[in-house]
Image (cartoon, grey):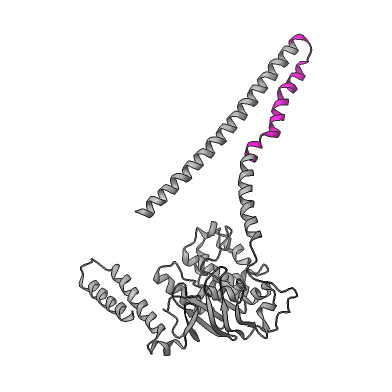
Amino acid sequence: PARLRAASAADAELTGIAARASAFTALGDGLMALITGLTVAGAAACGANAVVDGRLSGVALAVVVLTPLAAFEAVLGLPLAVRQRQRVRRSAERVYEVLDAPAPVREPERPAEAPASPFPLRLDGLVARHPGAARPALDGVDLTLDAGRRIAVVGASGAGKTTLAHVLLRFLDVEGGTYRVGDTPATALDGDAVREIVGLCAQDAHVFDSSVRENLLLARKDATEAELRAMLSRARLLDWVDTLPHGLGTLVGEHGARLSGGQRQRLALARALLADFPVLVLDEPAEHLDLETADALTRDLLAATEGRTTLLITHRLAGLEGAVDEVVVLDEGRVVQRGDMTRLLSTPGPLHRMWRQERATDALRGAAGEGPAGSASAEDVRAEARDTVVAAR
């Protein structure tokens, strides 16, 4: 109820702003029409008197009447220009705020050449801190990505998973330790050169208000139709695209409004696959999706990236067993456990606790959607889930 009241209040405020703007627009347009009409009527009256007195010919009277209309045509857009000026000024303030912000990373004065091979991509004792933060977001993290290796980084929210992605893409500077791409320190490379090696498919990947085709071509402008369809097929989106009335030319709406959450993520994945980054970072790709869709998307993502060097950042463990080479567990910016998932699940530890708690949460959600609240099956599931949560804690 509180959220609904806040939304209603915001809607009422926006409606009021729109109403006031419309009122000013109507007033300006009305005054312009009134002044134009009065001016034309005055000119016509003066011209008619001149014709009666013989000082003006009848043909010239038409010119006298039409001249005010032509004059007002030149200034007809001024009210709209005044309104747009205010919008542009506010937009410029936001743009300058971004331009004037300090650079998040230090670029080298003389960037080194990108290595022939980016592998191994290695982090040793990495320490990274967000500007103004009291403690490091990452502290002493070691990570090695070899060609074709797939690693899952898991942990609770705030554990430092997304910060790790920001460091890999040179969106955040390293405070301590080393980050090397092949034999070259990442700090010696131009940031754009690093981002040509390490690509990101983020949970909030932007989808532009254009067609499916144009959104994909952002990754590679010269991609052929066959290549676009191949990437859509790998992302499990081609069958859906083929059902659309305009196929690849179908518009997806602002921020992909005409797509479901899973379809937006699959489109972003297809775009990342088309770019063919040597290293692909998937940052919480199934966030904000229901469990069934999230788990299906994760399975498809892992299938689509098979054979490709991939770092999967996720808080979900479902579908990872047997699909990744290593699991790294982060907690408060530190690596607290790492290794083969099957082995880690068979021994007590942070990953085992996360897995049991995830199963308990899924069971509770499943119970909430089953039949009446008093049914024996639902109660049994709830009881088992509660026991599992207690054991996990």
When the figure is inspected, residue 59 is found, relative to residue 342, above or below; the finding is: above
Indicate the quadrant where residue 222 lies. bottom right
Q: How many marks?
A: 0
Q: Position of residue 120 (x, y in %)?
A: 62, 86
| Residue at 60% across, 72% down | 172
The residue most toward the front is 134
Is residue 53 within the magenta segment? Answer: yes
| Residue at 66% across, 34% down | 76
Magenta range: 52-81
Indicate the quadrant where residue 45 lies. top right
Is residue 131 within the magenta segment? Answer: no
When the figure is inspected, residue 203 is found, relative to residue 322, above or below; the finding is: above
Q: Nearer the viewer, residue 74 or 244?
A: 74
The quarter of the rendered structure image containing the C terminus is: bottom left
Residue 253 seen in this snapshot: no
Q: Position of residue 250 (x, y in %)?
A: 55, 59
Secondary structure mostly seen in magenta is helix
Q: Position of residue 297 (x, y in %)?
A: 46, 73
